[in-house]
Amino acid sequence: MRWTSIIAIFTLFWVLAAFLVMPFGLRTHDELGMEKVPGQAHSAPGNFRPRAFLLRTTVLAVVMFGLYYANYVHQWVTVDDLDFSPWLGQPKTS
């Protein structure tokens, strides 16, 4: 696998991890008992910590990419394993 492919695939895993990690640990101003600024959304987080968010996202992305790369090297799950045509009532083509 080329290093450019590794960077691109890791970036995709990182973005996915960011969306998976984002809602955990955040509390609104109402939940924290803090005052809101006039015009502020009720759902705005009151305790957003960017460093913790970036760390958790990166750790999850490294784990997911590590599993992906191990599967790429060892071929645990291949394209042939993902053939769902018998379940769809279609004849197998290969």
Image: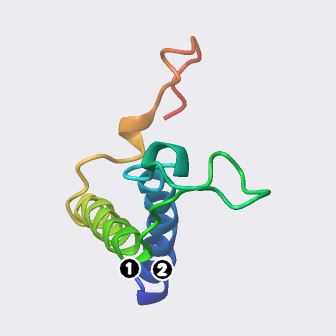
Q: How is the image coloured?
A: rainbow
Q: Quadrant of the N terminus?
A: bottom left
Please state the horizontal and vertical placement of residue 5, each as a whole percent of the image: 48, 79
Q: Is residue 2 above or below residue 10?
A: below
Q: Secondary structure at mark 2?
A: helix
Which residue is drawn at the image coordinates 62% and 54% (left, top)? 44
Q: Which residue is mark 1?
A: 1
Looking at the rendered structure, the secondary structure element under dot 1 is: loop
Give whichever of 79, 51 is nearer the camera.
51
The label on residue 89 is none
Along the line of sight, which residue is nearer the eye, 43 or 57? 43
Please state the horizontal and vertical placement of residue 91, each as a whole percent of the image.
55, 18
Nearer to us in this view, 45 or 15: 45
Direction from residue 83 to residue 36 in the image, left or right: right
Q: Which residue is rendered at x = 41% and y = 70% of the image?
A: 49
What's the amino acid at mark 2? Ser
Marks 2,1: beta carbons within 8 A:
yes
Q: 72 left or right of 14?
A: left
Residue type of the residue flagged with mark 1? Met
Position above or below: 2 against 42: below
The answer to whether 3 is drawn above or below residue 30 in the figure is below
Judge the density around disc 1: few (<14), some (14-19), many (≥20) Cα neighbours within 10 Å: few
Write down the residue under mark 2: 5
Neighbor class of circle 2 (other Cα within 10 Å; few <14, some 14-19, many 20+) is few
Give coordinates of residue 3: x percent, y percent.
Answer: 41, 88
Q: Would you identify the image quadrant in which residue 74 lies?
A: bottom left
Q: Residue lying farthest right?
A: 39
